[in-house]
């Protein structure tokens, strides 16, 4: 009888651990997929920036847009640094 309670308790614990492991695997797999998507988007954004950088010589609007974007990028970088520190 005591062995049956122990086996049942261990079985429940094992089921809980397996369930938790599956949840973590799904989470990690989902995160990896999102990271891949972000990498693709980042590459596209870099191409737009390269193109805009070439066009800024002749286009004042593009030049101003890049200047504003640069300011936002610096603010974003500061935010990420502060977030990682705290």
Image: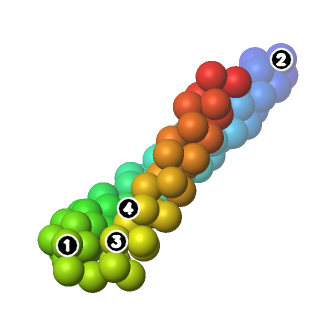
75 lies above or below 60: above
Element type at mark 2: helix
Residue 30 at what x, y percent from top left?
A: 46, 58
Name the residue carrying label 2.
2
Along the horizontal axis of the image, is 42 left or right of 28? left
Residue 47 at what x, y percent from top left?
A: 20, 69
Q: Residues within 10 Å of mark 3 (few under 14, many from 20)?
A: some
Name the residue carrying label 1.
57
Q: Earlier in the sequence, mark 4 or mark 1?
A: 4
Q: Residues within 10 Å of mark 2 (few under 14, many from 20)?
A: few
- Tell me the tag on residue 38: 4
- Tell me the tag on residue 31: none
Give the Cα separation between the discs numbered 3 and 1. Answer: 7 Å
Asked whether disc 2 touches disc 3, contact meaning CB atoms under 8 Å apart, the reply is no
86 lies above or below 38: above
Name the residue carrying label 3.
63
Quarter of the figure that contains the N terminus = top right
């Amino acid at each position: 009888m005591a062995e049956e309670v122990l086996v049942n308790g261990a079985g429940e614990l094992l089921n809980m651990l397996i369930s938790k492991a599956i949840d973590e695997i799904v989470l990690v797999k989902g995160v990896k997929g999102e990271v891949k998507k972000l990498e693709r988007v980042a590459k596209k954004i870099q191409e737009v920036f390269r193109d805009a950088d070439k066009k800024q010589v002749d286009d004042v609007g593009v030049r101003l847009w890049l200047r504003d974007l640069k300011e936002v990028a610096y603010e974003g970088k500061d935010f990420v640094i502060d977030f990682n520190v705290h």
